Amino acid sequence: MATVKRAPAGAAVLRNDITVAIRNAVMSELAEVGYGRLSIEAVARRAGVGKTAIYRRWSNKLEMVLEIITDVAGRKVPVPDTGSFADDLDLLMMIVSRALQHRVASQIIPDLMAEAARNPQIAETLQRVLRLHQQSVGEKLVGQAIARGELPEGTDADVAVDLILGPLYWRLAVSRQPIDGDYLEKLAAAVLGSLRGGSAKSK
């Protein structure tokens, strides 16, 4: 008589499609109601799963949100390498501004930043992930520009990325003003002039 083999219990049988559905549901709930009002029950309903499916993956709301946000925030923005720092700068600003204007990101980012002021674990996670991401972008973007002789030796990569991304975040996530091609062109010219003038050199 043939015997039926039982599937192993625990993490080994977690279905990836269910995990993806839950992650998508979390992002949608964050965009609609924010972290404070997000609930496991609402996420489960939106994902079309039972609460048990969520608790098999994460022990609580904070753990669930931190893991998902870490994954999303840690995804690398493609750093352009067009052969020209000016063109790299234009392209990077366009990519980042479009990402910040995405309907989900534009709701989630300000909410999580506000929540970070109240929750040290969220603050620490966001700072760690964003700083690693910033360092990666800066080192490549500035490094290749220095190698091509387009920026002075000793240009500080962290300061450069602050100059590039800071105004975009401020305008889109804080002051909530639209960004068009004309603004990006003026911003890129201002950043380029500052960096080429050597004002972002390491001390």
Image (spheres, grey):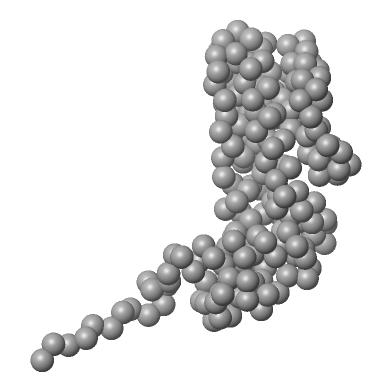
Any part of residue 113 in sight: no
Which image quarter holds the N terminus? bottom left
**Residue at 49% from the left image edge and 69% from the top image edge:** 18
Number of marks in picture: 0
Quadrant of the rendered structure where residue 55 is?
A: bottom right
Quadrant of the rendered structure where residue 202 is?
A: top right
**Residue at 80% from the left image edge and 51% from the top image edge:** 110
Check the image and report above or below for 162 versus 31. Answer: above
Q: In this view, does 6 lie to the left or right of 63?
A: left
* Residue 198: image location, x then y, percent: 75, 12
Q: Residue furthest right?
A: 175
Q: In this view, does 191 lie to the left or right of 61?
A: right
Which image quarter holds the C terminus? top right
Depth check: 13 or 185 in front?
185
* Residue 148: image location, x then y, percent: 56, 10
Any part of residue 16 in sight: yes
**Residue at 80% from the left image edge and 59% from the top image edge:** 115
Quadrant of the rendered structure where residue 119 is?
A: bottom right
**Residue at 57% from the left image edge and 25% from the top image edge:** 80
Q: Which residue lies furthest to the bottom in this view?
A: 1
Q: Is residue 138 left or right of residue 193?
A: left
Depth check: 77 or 31 in front?
31
Check the image and report above or below for 90 versus 125. Answer: above
* Residue 94: image location, x then y, percent: 68, 30
Check the image and report above or below for 59 versus 122. Answer: below
Depth check: 32 or 163 in front?
32
Q: Residue furthest top?
A: 149
* Residue 88: image location, x then y, percent: 62, 21
